Amino acid sequence: MPDFPANASLLWLVALAAYLLGSIPFGLLIARAFGLGDVRKIGSGNIGATNVLRTGNKSAAAATLVLDALKGALAVLIARAMMGEAAAQVAALAAFLGHCFPIWLKFKGGKGVATFIGVLYALSWPVGLAVSLTWLVVVAMFRMSSLGALLAAGLAPVWSIVLGYGAGAILLMVLCVLVYTRHAANISRLRAGTEPKIGASKTE
């Protein structure tokens, strides 16, 4: 675990700022900017990139993916530059929670995969790259985005230890649990064999 600074009370301000940054609902905003309507009324009702893609607009989905990842990465990088590694980890958790439970949308947000990847790259880019490649391999094999996300998140703490970022292993375990919690419905469908594959018209 990282050493906490003497002025640890300031970490609450870091957490608040990171939460507010993470809570920006880019999927909702981008869908409206592209004239696609309210993404919460489309497909699964999720505000993430996967559901934005169901509108048929790949550019909007790509923009959502990038911005959701970027807000997580920025929260971590700014916090680290200001107060060090402890603040970076606090910001990572807070930004992720902001995306999943945004105050602007009555705490009904996305599943957090893009933001999760974003904070990983900022915390340790080798871990972020390993997790991204894990997701890509699983999706290429099984054509299930949710399965890729679950396996990638589950392996994130392992990758952190293998690739020399053991200080972040506990944080990544917490984030992994949150990712799995947000994917509870997907897990149920995976167990039942009813989880749709990429390209299918069913909701996620």
Image: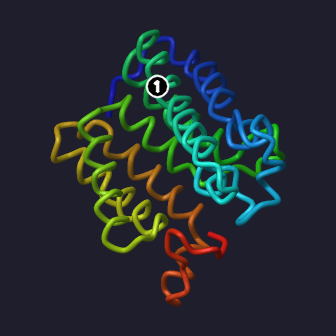
The x and y percentages for residue 177 are 48, 59
Quadrant housing residue 43 = bottom right
Residue 113, compared with residue 17, is above or below; it is below
Farthest-out residue, bottom: 192
Of residue 65 and residue 166, the one placed in the foreground of this image is 65
The x and y percentages for residue 182 are 59, 61
Of residue 132 and residue 14, the one placed in the foreground of this image is 132
Residue 11, compared with residue 150, is above or below; it is above
Of residue 195 and residue 60, the one placed in the foreground of this image is 60
**Count of numbered circles on the image:** 1
Q: Quadrant of the N terminus?
A: top left
**Color theme of the render:** rainbow
- Residue at 56% of width from left, 49% of height from top? 112
Q: Does residue 5 appear left or right of residue 179 in this picture? A: left
The x and y percentages for residue 164 are 17, 37
Q: Does residue 151 appear left or right of residue 47 in this picture? A: left
Q: Does residue 37 appear left or right of residue 139 in this picture? A: right
* Circle 1 Cα neighbour tier, 10 Å, few/some/many (<14 / 14–19 / ≥20): many
Name the residue tied to disc 1: 76
- Residue at 23% of width from left, 40% of height from top? 166
- Residue at 44% of width from left, 31% of height from top? 89
Disc 1 is placed on an element classified as: helix
Badge 1 amino acid: Val
Residue 76, compared with residue 110, is above or below; it is above
Q: Quadrant of the C terminus?
A: bottom right
- Residue at 65% of width from left, 57% of height from top? 51
Q: Does residue 121 appear left or right of residue 16 in this picture? A: left
